[in-house]
Image (cartoon, rainbow, N blue to C red):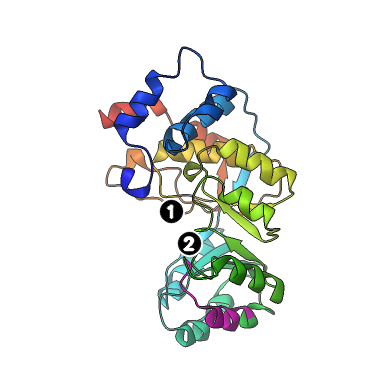
Amino acid sequence: MPGFGTDTVDRAEAECASLGDIVDDGVLARLERASPALRNALSNALSEAAWAPCHSSLGVAALLPAGRQALVEAPPKAEAGFRVFKWKVGVGAADDELAILDDILAALPSGSSLRLDANGSWSRRTASLWLDRAADRPIEFVEQPVAPTAKGADDTLLGLASDYPVPLALDESLVADGDVARWLDLGWRGFFVVKPLLLGDPVAALSRLEKAGARVVFSSCLETALGARESLRLAFSWPGGTAALGFGVWPLFMDPRFDGPCLAPFIAVDDFERINPEALWSAVN
């Protein structure tokens, strides 16, 4: 999708024509950085040839809507078996949302944890208010409290991470080639929310995260079932800690054939291995 900074179809086709008969890691390394979608596809294809799952199933976080509607949707999702929940915040006034926080926590089953996702909407002052409140509550982490485009964002995020006990997670800060390496070099010890399809070479990025002992959360970028298949394959081959996946997003499409695995508290290997790329390609054409 060129509007999102990725390759055009014509560029990808021209790059493919120049690759030769065999693609290996050396060819991948030589590909232009301006072709992240093609590099991603080839990286996934190369890694799939030798992939082996490290897990038979992984938990999924239930996505809660903003505001008081979360109180309506949390109980049925808890009844369905979810124990990790993600609440979208930073949508309404901070005082109003802070007043709802304890109501949401009270509505969750014992032993549950809550993720707060601000999508980069807070100032440092607002982030501090939330992190103060979250300090003695079952908050797994606070995701992207400050926008990566805000002035001094890197220093602000690093400062918040060191000033408060609640872990922070990077999401929108990890959308381009080199972002993972840059944050590792900065010494980030919080969570990395990784959307594999956004990375030019996800295998290399995940290898760096593994070597650093990083805490990783695999997440959807609202992809079709084909993209979900590749992202989930990487999640299931991750040898590190198994934080609940951020893949509780489907259904998304008018044609259900393009949706990933159905919303459930767990995704098993069989759930995404049943996705047939050839059938999806035929559906498009």
Q: Residue furthest top?
A: 21
Amino acid type at mark 1: Val
Q: Which residue is mark 2?
A: 63
**For this rendering, which residue is in front, 61 or 220?**
220
Decide: marks 1, 2 in contact (CB < 8 A)?
yes
Where residue 203 sits: x, y (%)? 60, 36
Q: Is residue 166 left or right of residue 102?
A: right
Q: Residue at x 60, y 62 (%)?
A: 169
Of residues 139 and 153, which is closer to you in this image? 153
Rendered residue at 27%/47% (across/down): 254
Residue span colored magenta: 119-131
The reply to whether residue 59 is visible in this rendering is no
128 in the magenta segment: yes
Measured along the vertical axis of the image, is residue 247 above or below residue 44?
A: below
Question: Which class describes the residues within 10 Å of circle 1: few (<14), some (14-19), or many (20+)?
Answer: some
Q: CA distance from mark 1 to mark 2?
A: 7 Å
Please name the amino acid that badge 2 sits on: Leu
Total numbered labels placed on residues in the image: 2
Q: Can residue 248 be seen from the camera position used here?
A: yes
Position in image of residue 257 (x %, y %): 34, 38
Which quadrant holds residue 204? Answer: top right
For the point 52% across and 19% down, the residue is: 23
Q: Residues within 10 Å of mark 2 (few under 14, many from 20)?
A: many
Say which quadrant the N terminus sits in.
Answer: top left
Q: Is residue 152 above or below residue 45?
A: below
**Residue 285: x percent and y percent?**
25, 28
Q: Which residue is mark 1?
A: 249
In terms of secondary structure, what is the magenta stretch mainly?
helix
The foreground one among 279 and 222 is: 222
